Amino acid sequence: MARISKEYDERKKEIMDTSMKLFTEKGYEDTSVNLIIKTIGLSKGAFYYYFKSKEELLDAVVSERTGLVLAGITPIVGDERLNAIEKINAIFCNAVRIKAEMKETLHAIYRIFMDPRYMIIRYKLERQNSGIFAPELEKVIKQGIEEKVFDLKSCEQIAELLLKLSTVLNDAILELYNDYDMKPPVEIIIRKTEIYQQAMQRILGAPESSIKIFDEESMRKAFSYS
């Protein structure tokens, strides 16, 4: 049974990795299920055994990337050596570094999400991400209140608010990709991220200049085009 499960997981990951490579090279619309199965050497029936549709496949691919970010968050949240501000900064800086490491995938996903036809997928994934990240972020906010570095009476709904604002930031970046034909100036993305950073600091009631959620080098790597 364990061997069957391993083979299932390996084949599913092969489909996801191959599809993401094709999405990146050819675009989502021009990557058909037929092209995916031909590239892998898979039957159509086998493909639909793993995924009901190309949209479900995309959902799984993006969710996998979300899982990578979460895997980097959990150890930070549980690190007793870090205070709340250090954790907040580390969580968001780590997310930027991961985006830099999977830059090609990130750009492919942005290109897909610019298409209005996939708004429902975006919305579903944003809800899913909020459900995953909010509880972890809430733990850190609660710690910051206990340490008296966040001027808040309660951590209730603050994590969700910060994540909703991050969605606004992501939407703004998507608009830039659309306005600049997929090549927006990195400086503009950095400025918009700085605005979000300032808003986060004020919402948390954190000390001036204490919240630093990205390093410029990683941002430039994540949003460069070479």
Image (cartoon, rainbow, N blue to C red):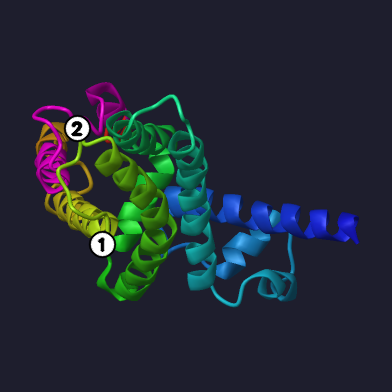
Q: Over which residues does the magenta segment extend? A: 192-221
Q: Residue 157 carries which label?
A: 1
Q: Does the magenta stretch include residue 204?
A: yes
Please state, as top left, top right, bottom left or bottom right, where the N terminus lies in the image: bottom right
For label 1, the crowd category at 10 Å Cα-Cα, with few meaning under 14, some 14 to 19 and many 20 or more, is few
- Choose top left, top right, bottom left or bottom right for residue 117: bottom left
What amino acid is found at the position of numbered circle 1 in the picture? Gln
Residue 192 percent location from the top left of the image: 11, 42
Q: Relative to 121, is 151 on the left or the right?
A: left
Q: Which residue is drawn at 26% across and 54% down?
A: 155
Residue that carries the numbered disc 2 in the rendered image: 211
Q: Is residue 61 above or below residue 196?
A: below
**Residue at position x 27%, y 22% in the image:** 217
| Residue for point 31% across, 62% down | 113
| Dot 2 amino acid type | Ile
Q: Is mark 1 on a helix, strand or loop?
A: loop
Q: Which of 39 and 101 is in front in this view?
A: 101
